Image: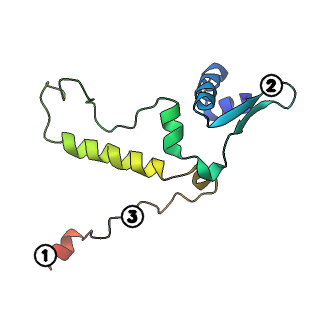
Amino acid sequence: MTEIAQAQILSVAYLEQLFARLRRSGLVDSARGPGGGYRLARPADAITIGEIIEAVDEPITATRCSDGTPGCLSGNRCLTHDLWHELGEQIRLFLLHTSLADVVEGRVCGRAVPPADYRCRDEDSA
C-alpha cells in the first residue's frame, strides 16, 4: 500500500479509504495477515474504470451545474449547458466501456472514434 501511495503521491490513509470503498462495492477483496492486502474481486477485464470511479464517489461531470440546483453561474441555464452535459455523458460512457485490463495492457489509445454517420465540415461543403 505504501508503494502505491508514494507512486501516486497520495497519503496511505486516503488510499486506505479508497480501497475500503472499492471493497464495499465488491471490486476488491481484502485479506488480513502475512501476505494479506487487496486483490481484485473479478478479472481485470470485467471491471470498468467507470465502476471504479463510481465506487469511490468521484463524479464524472463536465459542468459546474448539478441536478436540483438553480442552474449555471448566474442562476439561469447557460447556452452551453447541454454541450458540457453531453460531454460529461460521453466521458462517463467511455469509462464504463474501458476495462481495468484495457488500461493496464495499454489498449486505451485510439478508442475514441467518431460515430458512423460523422462527416467532417469540409465534406459537407463539397
Viewed as shown, does residue 30 lie left or right of 19? right
User: Around disc 2, counting alpha carbons within 10 Å, would you say few (fewer than 14), some (14 to 19), or many (20 or more)?
Assistant: few
Task: Please tell me whether mark 3 or mark 2 is closer to you in this view.
Answer: 2
Task: Please tell me whether mark 1 or mark 2 is closer to you in this view.
Answer: 2
User: Around disc 1, counting alpha carbons within 10 Å, would you say few (fewer than 14), some (14 to 19), or many (20 or more)?
Assistant: few
x, y (%) of residue 48? 54, 47
User: Which label belongs to residue 32?
Assistant: 2
User: Which label belongs to residue 125?
Assistant: 1
Secondary element at image label 3 = loop
Question: Mark 3 = which residue?
Answer: 113
Type of amino acid under label 2: Arg
The span from disc 1 to disc 2 (Cα, nearest Å) is 65 Å
x, y (%) of residue 12? 66, 23
- Disc 3 to disc 2: CB gap under 8 Å: no
Task: Please tell me whether mark 3 or mark 1 is closer to you in this view.
Answer: 3
Q: Quadrant of residue 22?
A: top right
